[in-house]
Image (cartoon, grey):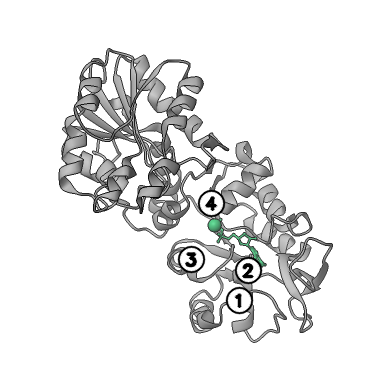
Amino acid sequence: MAKKIVSDLQVKGKKVLIRVDFNVPMKNGVITDDTRIRAALPTIEYVVNHGGKAIVFSHLGRIKEEADIAKNDITPVAKRLEELIGKPVKFVNATRGKELENAANALNEGEILMFQNTRYEDLDGKKESKNDPELGKYWASLGDVFVNDAFGTAHRAAASNVGIAANVKETAAGFLLEKEIKYIGGAVDNPVRPYVAILGGAKVSDKIGVIEALLNKADKVLIGGAMMFTFLKAMGKNIGTSKFEEDKLDLANELLAKGKGKLVLPVDTVVNKAFEDVKGTVKSVDALDADDMGLDIGPKTLELFAKELNGAKTVVWNGPMGVFEMKNYAAGTIGVCELLANLKDANTIIGGGDSAAAAESLGYADKVSHISTGGGASLEYLEGIELPGIACVDEK
Ligand code: ADP
Ligand code: MG
């Protein structure tokens, strides 16, 4: 079974509701990174180029109190969309009401309308985030068909995804969501083997579910990042002052037992005496001093990972290998980017906010198969949890 895609819909003359993820970073009302807006352009362009009337909407930030309203005004996003798409974008500064309804009904084929931040509705009993049924029904009434292209929020049932889908005749995935389903969904449902997972980042506790799921699914699970030290400590090694989680040592032991033959831990690390960006020292994981803090995986570990990745056909990577934000501790993360880039005929997938940002800033965006647009959503998807924002999309 495959999901219906926007290109499967007859959009001509129809009001097409398009849920996008325009939750862009902003500073004092100015957009600092418009990647997410660019990423949604193919779906919006498809609709308007095929005679659809596009009604585009997104959440932006979190709305908990009155003061959050002005801070999360989505008007600058509508302006940027207009610049990027090269067409006028009508904007209604409301999430419901006569003005919005009239604007939707007045749309001509090929025109675009955007309305205010869907989470403005959260001020009144979290109507958007808690999927208030009346709100979903109301938004659905503004259009004829629904396209969900917001992967970043697909792991939560909101009025603007599941709520609308329950009240329209047809729901399809946008091209961005389609890509997430193809790559991450593909790795979950039937990965081409050998299937190697690489996990790193800050904490074991953030990723327990995904480690367990991948230990069941993947052929090998390579561990780096700060989470490696929870495992190494559980194995009885001296980890100096490296970051680890005391309350996850038992769990780490369980995972070590369960993952015998699958779980691959680093053999060396780059240490420093303090958490600062000065040149570190490479040490075997068996030779740390009491005042050593491991901030990256070492070169021997990269060699080991290269061997494990040799011939891999599916690779999923979540979590940086070290403190890549510091140039002296970025080598492990760069090294893994390089290993992925050099794999032949492999599906290489990067998920997780920081790992995705690392791969992009290091220039590897075009050298892997897919960089996921959703941090939390990609973790839950990899875990094998059904995402409501995908489940609500019709099958073909
Ligand atoms: P992602 O967002 O990709 O899922 P995480 O949020 O789990 O990744 O972790 C990213 C953070 O982990 C980065 O800020 C990085 O500096 C930190 N990190 C990685 N390795 C270490 C380490 N050895 N010590 C301390 N922090 C680390
Ligand atoms: Mg993160």
Residue 211 seen in this snapshot: no
Q: Secondary structure at mark 3?
A: helix
Q: Nearer the viewer, mark 4 or mark 3?
A: 4
- Image coordinates of residue 16 in percent, x first then y, are 27, 25
Asked if the residue under mark 3 is in contact with the one under mark 4, i.e. CB atoms within 8 Å, the reply is no
Answer few, some or many: residues within 10 Å of disc 2's Cα (few below 14, many 20 plus, some between 14 and 19): many
| Distance from mark 4 CB to nearest ligand 1 atom below 8 Å | yes
Residue at the spot 29% in from the left edge and 33% down from the top edge: 94
Q: State which quadrant residue 177 falls in.
A: top left
Q: Earlier in the sequence, mark 4 or mark 2?
A: 2
Neighbour class for label 4 at 10 Å: few (<14), some, many (≥20)? Answer: some
Q: Nearer the viewer, residue 7 or 150?
A: 150
Query: Between residues 279 and 135, which one lies in front from this camera angle?
Result: 135
Q: Which residue is mark 4?
A: 353
User: Does the beta carbon at disc 2 come under 8 Å from ligand 1?
Assistant: yes
Which numbered disc flags the more N-terminal residue, 4 or 1?
Answer: 1
Ligand 2: which quarter? bottom right
Question: Of callouts 2 and 1, which one flags the residue occurring earlier in the amino acid sequence?
Answer: 2
The residue pinned by badge 1 equals 244
For label 1, being within 8 Å of ligand 1 is answered no
Residue type at numbered disc 3: Lys
Q: Which mark is residue 226?
A: 2
Tag 2 and tag 3, C-beta contact below 8 Å: no
Q: Amino acid at mark 1?
A: Phe
Q: Label 2 to label 1, Cα distance in Å?
A: 7 Å
- Chain-order first, disc 4 or disc 3: 3
Identify whether 284 is placed above or below 97: below
Q: Is mark 3 within 8 Å of ligand 1?
A: yes
Local crowd size for mark 1, using a 10 Å CA cut-off: few (<14), some (14–19), many (≥20):
many
Instruction: Tell whether label 1 touches label 2 (CB within 8 Å).
Output: yes
Density class for disc 3 (Cα within 10 Å; few <14, some 14-19, many ≥20) is: many
